[in-house]
Image (cartoon, rainbow, N blue to C red):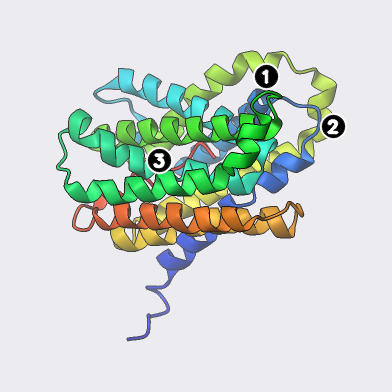
Amino acid sequence: MPVQGTSFKPYSETITGSIIYGTIGVFLDRIQDMSVGSILFCRLFFGLFLIFFYLLLSGSLEQLRPGRNRKYLLLLGFMNAITGICYLSAIRYSGISVAVLLLYTAPVYVNLLAPSILGERSSSKSLLPLFLSVAGVLLITRPGEVLASLSTGSDFMKGLLFGLLSGLSFGTTIITIRYLRHDYTGISQTFWLTGISLLFMLPSALSTPIPVYFRNFSTLLLFGLTITFAAILYLKGISGIRAQTGSILALLEPVSGIFFDTAVLRNPFYISTFLGCVLILTAAYLVSRKGTGDRSLSTDFQQDNFQ
C-alpha cells in the first residue's frame, strides 16, 4: 500500500536527520588547530541556542521546567560530554568509519545493563547481538595491525580505545535517558544535556586562543547549527513513526558516516571494516526489534544528541 504524501513526512525527517549526522567527520576534518573539547563546546553552544529558539517559536518553553530527578540531569550532561569527547577523538585518530561503528555497540551495552539497572526483562537472545558486536569490533580493529602497533601506541589504536569508550558511555547515556523518560520530554532532555555538557567543556574552550576561534568560526557555526538541526529534525520524525521502524532507519547514520568518510574524505575502506559494519548493524537491528511494542525502549537509542 503506497504511503500517503502527508504520512511520509516523519519518515523523510528521520532519514534526513540520520544522513546529516553522518557529516560530522567532514566538519571535523575542516576545523584546524582546535582541541576536541573546544570543538565540542562550540557545537554545543550553537546547538543550545538553536534548541532554545526552536522551543520559543513553537511555544514549548514550559518543557524546560526542571522536574523530578534533577540530579540525573547532571549525570546525563556529564556522560554526554564524555561520549562527545571520545567519539570526536575516535574520528580524529581512526576515521569516521571505525568511530561510528564502535559507537553503535551502545545498544548491546544497554541490552546487557538495562535488566539489572532498570529492571527490564532480558532473555537468552541477548547473547546473539553481543556475539555479533564483539565479532564486528574484532574485524574492525584488524587484530594484526593492533598487535603490531601496541609498542608504538599508534593513532589507530588510540582511536579504537576512544571508540569503545564512546560506545560504553553512550550506552550509559541511553539508560539515563530511559530512566528520565517519564519526567522529561525528549527535546527537554536534549536541551538540558546540551547545556550541562557545555559547562563541562568550558575549561577546554577557555584554553583555546581567541584568534583560533575566529579562523574557524564559519565552520564551527555551520557545524553546530547543522548537527543540532539534524537532532531536531530527527526527534520530530521519530515521534511520528513506529518505534521499530525508527530504530531501523537510525542505522542510516553509520552508513551515511562511512559514505562521507570514503567519498568526501577519501579515507581507505577495508573489507574487514565492511564485514564488521554488517555484524554491528545486524546486532543493533536485532536489539531494536526487541523494542517492538515499547515505543520508549527503541527511541531512547535514537536520541544520540551528543553528536
Q: Is 51 drawn above or below residue 237 in the view shown?
A: above
Report whether 32 appears left or right of 290: right
Most distant residue in the bottom direction: 1
Which quarter of the rendering shows the C terminus?
Answer: top right
Q: Nearer the viewer, residue 248 or 163?
A: 163
Asked whether the beta carbons under mark 3 and mark 2 sit within 8 Å of each other, the answer is no
Question: Residue 289: x percent and y percent?
Answer: 27, 58
Q: Which mark is residue 106?
A: 3
The answer to whether residue 35 of the structure is visible from this angle is yes
The residue wearing badge 2 is 215
Question: Residue 136: x percent and y percent?
Answer: 47, 49
The residue wearing badge 1 is 205
Report whether 211 appears left or right of 273: right
Q: Give the amino acid type for the residue marked by disc 3 in the picture.
A: Ala
Report whether 115 appears left or right of 163: left
Distance from disc 1 to disc 3, alpha carbons, whole Å, reads 28 Å
Residue at the (45%, 36%) spot, across then down: 167
Residue at the (41%, 47%) spot, across then down: 133
Q: Give the amino acid type for the residue marked by disc 1 in the picture.
A: Ala
